Image: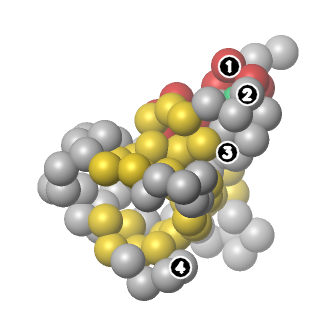
Amino acid sequence: MIVRFPVVLDNGRVINGNEKPFEFGDGQRHNGTDADGNRVTNIVGFDGEYLLKWCPHCEEVKISLDFGPEGRPDSDQLHRRDQSWCLVCRRP
Ligand SMILES: [Zn+2]
């Protein structure tokens, strides 16, 4: 899903999209909400341009776009949420 900054994590931390690259480390993953109100899950850091997400299927860390550009409808039908598996893992 295309993520629009700032992203507010559930723990209150804000990722503005202009930080230097970082990872939370220690296997930490966080969920949050982007500027469009869309849900982003399994965030492990930021590469200077894109959020870094962990795929629970291949267990690799990839940029958010590698999970697909569109996401899927969230349960509220108003917003979207990201796909949890990366594009490679979802390939039929
Ligand atoms: Zn994967």
Q: Residue 48 at what x, y percent from top left? A: 23, 43
- Cβ–Cβ below 8 Å for labels 4 and 2? no
Q: CA distance from mark 1 to mark 3?
A: 12 Å
Q: In terms of secondary structure, where does tag 4 sit?
A: loop
CA neighbours of label 2 inside 10 A, class few (<14), some (14 to 19), many (20+): few
CA neighbours of label 3 inside 10 A, class few (<14), some (14 to 19), many (20+): many
Q: Which badge, 3 or 4, is on the more N-terminal residue?
A: 4
Q: Quadrant of ligand 1?
A: top right
Q: Is mark 1 within 8 Å of ligand 1?
A: yes
Q: In terms of secondary structure, where does tag 1 sit?
A: helix
Residue to which mark 2 is pinned: 58
Asked whether, in this view, residue 18 is left or right of residue 47, the answer is: left
Q: Which badge, 1 or 2, is on the more N-terminal residue?
A: 2
Residue 35 visible in rendering = no
Residue at x 47%, y 53% (from the top left corner) = 25
Q: Is mark 3 within 8 Å of ligand 1?
A: no
Residue to which mark 3 is pinned: 83
Q: Which badge, 4 or 1, is on the more N-terminal residue?
A: 4
Asked whether, in this view, residue 48 is left or right of residue 66, the answer is: left
